[in-house]
Image (cartoon, helix red, strand yellow):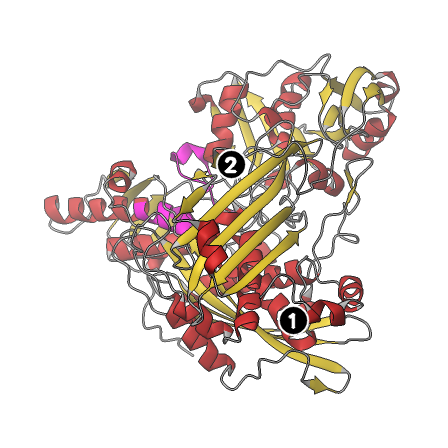
Amino acid sequence: MTEVRERTGVGAAEPRLEAREKVTGQALYAADRPVPGAAYAWPVPAAFARGRVNTVDTGPALAVDGVLSVLWHGNAPRLERSGDPHLRVLQTPEVTYRGQIVALVVATTPESAREGAEAVVIDARTAPADTVLRADHAGLYEPELVNGGYPGRLDKGDFDTGFGAAEVRVDATYHTPAEHHVAMEPHATTAFWEHGRLVVYDATQSSTAVRDSLATLFELPPQLVRVHNEHVGGGFGSKGAAKPNVVLAAMAARVVGRPVKLAMPRAAVFATEGYRTPTIQRVRLGADRRGRLVALGHESCSQSSRLVEYTEQAAVVSRVLYGVPNLATGHRVVRLDVPPPTWMRAPGDCPGAFALESAMDELAAAGNWDPVRLRIDNDAVTDAEGRPFSSRHLVECLLRGAERFGWAGRDPRPGTRREGRWLLGSGVAATTFPAITMPSTATARAISDDDFEVAVNAADIGTGARTVLRQIAADALGVDPGCVDISVGDSAIGPAPVAGGSMGTSSWGWAVTKACRQLRERIDGAHQGHVPPEGVATDADTTADLAARPDYARHAFGAQFCAVRVDPATGEVRVDRLLGVFAAGRIINPLTARSQLLGAMTMGVSMALMEQSVMDRRSGDFVTSDLSAYHVAVNADVPRIDVEVLEEEDPHLNPMGSKGVGELGIVGTAAAVANAVHHATGIRMRSLPITPAALLYASRGAYSARASTGGTT
Ligand code: MOS
């Protein structure tokens, strides 16, 4: 049987190139890399959240058979300062969070390293720790810039006057918990030194960033550091920059003079490799009688660590999603005795949209407006800074979604539909994520007329990056993808941005397009369309191309529709159906794009109903530190999910016309679920996750709460 394929380049549903390697166990991840004479490292975490390590008694650990070395701040090699203080591991006696690594045991086997780590005796002076985020915490301050480089505060018009004069108002506060990424592959590194050069195989979303951090910390020229990340088992932001594991492994390899493997134990991943900060967000919406927003206020509180200021940009989504004359958006952060939070899939927009899109549903209920109509009526023409959108099809997504979901004729009254013991409901939420592009380099080489090599230092973290980049290269060269060998995941290829911020395909793809088009021109111009026997090569850098782009607000949009059933006796919520309709520019590969959107929507259901990292407030310890305690959605929890992507042309992005799709699908999902739960039960869940216990607890006050719908008029 012959398979007839219409097209094989951009737009084709190409399966992942590395699929067979992965499912047959041939793909090598960071800790799998075979290296002769490897030693193994195991971390020793601080068992207190705040204090000083006086001394570390390494004797009992060194007495364990196979233990080669015990590193701690008293004997570890000195590191230079880097931009991220968290990377200066084992340099000072200070402990700033529970689980901070205070010693590292290196041994000939993982088992002896672990046994050694348990034998290390830490003598420390501890102090009471402050670990709880509260909206009235005295330490909260307004940072000038928040994550993503956005201004912390952005106001427009006169919020107080606008809100005061509004005819319909919502004033509500929403809570999102700390969450962990729990990528299947833990943070892991294989490191060795070779004639003064440092080579690492690292589980990272950016080998360029890791190379630069290691070069700084170990005072090496960047060309003496090589970082490989050919296969990465998920990241979701937690592997977006160099992390303690890679520095520890490199340090240990130097000390013991042989290759060192460090695969972080799962509990250490929870403690020290990053998490999504909890947020407390107050949203105030004011509308006129016809359902036009006249005032929007969004104030977010989040936490960071003593080591690093990281402010989740949760209110930034309110600068993009709706048009409103009077806007107040701000952020406050407090530095606590907790681990450094970091990026997690759709940082800012994801928790922010839970608050904003829940509040929009509350506004719709208060004004007796249809929630889809309310969103359409408040579509924006520019972002809050007055920039026009390069393309924006939120309204089309809402309309198409409503049609496909069967929204028409929905009875807005909550708690009125039953099927046996189940209460049924449906909800909607809007979605957006910035379409980011960053400078990248790439190279292309012609070996023969049907054999090309293209290299770009992308990280394929399970997204299909290498597959779509090969499609892009093939189109730019005007050949079949089968003629292109694509290389990724090696810092030696050249600088390229992180597989994060949904910027990968746009950024790497632009550089690939440029290198390949140059190559094609070179071949066609000088060689009558044939590759000369000695070959031709080109390289490209998109820094100048990006700087020349006009100033547009570039974002992808979408709408999510959700149907739930709720058992009022047990508080169980089942998501029956989830539909996402998105507009994200040109889709390079419908198969891998759908997989990204589907995965993110699944993660959104997980966020809505299950995920929460529980910290013991006295010890500062994340007690949910394994996958039996930290619940994520599994197959049985995932409903029927439908994904539709609208065609969207946008000439203001990059040569492919693509926007990112890695994060878009999680934004708004939790609000769609919570809004459906409200429609089913009449109970407004303003805190995540909506566990059976939380819903039952809230239902006890449901009748009194409904009589005075929290702050609406
Ligand atoms: Mo993603 S949180 O930008 O890796």
Disc 1 element: helix
Nearer the observer, 136 or 309: 136
Image position, residue 632 (x, y; %) = 69, 58
Residue, disc 1: 678
Q: Residue at x 77, y 69 (%)?
A: 699
Image position, residue 59 (x, y; %) = 86, 16
Q: Is residue 666 above or below residue 117?
A: below
Q: Is residue 241 above or below residue 351?
A: above
Image position, residue 571 (x, y; %) = 78, 70
Q: Is residue 259 visible?
A: no
Disc 2 element: strand
Q: Residue at x 25, y 44 (%)?
A: 549
Quadrant where the C terminus sits is bottom right
Q: Which residues are magenta?
A: 486-510
- The quadrant holding residue 110 is top right
Mark 2 residue's CB less than 8 Å from ligand 1: no
Q: CA distance from mark 1 to mark 2?
A: 48 Å
Residue, disc 2: 228
Q: Is residue 227 left or right of residue 604?
A: left
Mark 1 residue's CB less than 8 Å from ligand 1: no
Image position, residue 661 (x, y; %) = 45, 57
Q: Is residue 614 above or below residue 595?
A: above
